């Protein structure tokens, strides 16, 4: 099994998080599962928002509580991915976003990181008491669909978004802890 650790973001990860963001922006790719990193004015502002959003009573207006984690390769300490675990769903997340969003650095794809991140994220969801988890992806994102299916996802349906794209909605049943 691949070695990957999910860790809480902290000040020590600032440079790597900003490099992660830059790699996505240079590739013209979306920063899914990064708790708004693309729009963040600074690392400090992003980190403060991530910390606030972990608790229901301090989550930003319109947001659900969520745990954002960095996926780090232990052998070299490199940030290879991010995962955002939403503690509950609001109407939008039920339709299009799901309980879990994730991304893998473009230069590190096709190495099994997404599957391992999702697998570890599902363990955390079970520890939070969730019995089933909704994970979504764009219909065109075949790699993400394969990842979700490999982790037990069952396609419920597809929903058209306002931008004309189509979101696939997969449910993953979690065995009791």
Image (cartoon, helix red, strand yellow):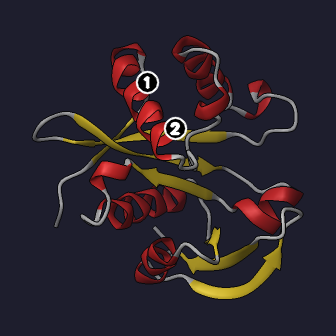
Q: Nearer the viewer, residue 67 or 174?
A: 67
Residue 29 in the image, given as x and y percentages of width and height: 53, 50
Front of the two marks 2 and 1 = 2
Quadrant of image for the N terminus: bottom left
Secondary structure state at the residue bearing disc 2? helix
Q: In the rendered view, tell whether residue 144 sits above or below residue 87.
A: below
Residue at x-position 47% and y-position 33%? 21
Q: Report if residue 54 is visible in the image.
A: no
Residue at x-position 54% and y-position 46%? 28
Disc nearer the start of the sequence (2/1): 1
Residue 76 in the image, given as x and y percentages of width and height: 12, 36
Mark 1, Cα crowd under 10 Å, few <14 / some 14-19 / many 20+, is: some
**The disc label shown at residue 18, or none:** 1
Q: In the rendered view, tell whether residue 88 sits above or below residue 95.
A: above
Residue 56 in the image, given as x and y percentages of width and height: 75, 34
**Residue 166 located left or right of residue 11:** right
Residue 45 in the image, given as x and y percentages of width and height: 62, 14
Mark 2, Cα crowd under 10 Å, few <14 / some 14-19 / many 20+, is: few
Residue 3, quarter of the rendered image: bottom left
**The disc label shown at residue 106, or none:** none
Q: Nearer the viewer, residue 146 or 70?
A: 146
Quadrant of image for the C terminus: bottom left
Secondary structure state at the residue bearing disc 1? helix
Q: Report if residue 116 is visible in the image.
A: yes
Residue 7, quarter of the rendered image: top left
Residue bearing the label numbered 2: 25
């Amino acid at each position: 099994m691949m070695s990957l650790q999910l860790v809480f973001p902290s000040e020590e990860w600032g440079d790597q998080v900003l490099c992660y963001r830059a790699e996505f922006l240079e590739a013209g790719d979306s920063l899914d599962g990064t708790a708004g990193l693309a729009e963040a004015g600074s690392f400090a502002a992003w980190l403060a928002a991530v910390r606030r959003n972990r608790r229901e009573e301090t989550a930003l207006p319109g947001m659900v509580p969520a745990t954002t984690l960095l996926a780090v390769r232990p052998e070299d300490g490199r940030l290879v991915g991010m995962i955002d675990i939403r503690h509950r769903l609001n109407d939008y997340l039920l339709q299009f976003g799901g309980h879990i969003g994730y991304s893998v650095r473009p230069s590190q794809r096709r190495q099994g990181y997404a599957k391992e991140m999702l697998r570890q994220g599902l363990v955390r969801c079970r520890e939070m008491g969730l019995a089933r988890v909704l994970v979504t992806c764009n219909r065109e994102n075949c790699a993400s669909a394969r990842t979700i299916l490999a982790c037990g996802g069952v396609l419920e349906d597809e929903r058209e978004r306002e931008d004309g794209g189509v979101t696939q909605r997969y449910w993953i049943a979690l065995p009791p802890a």
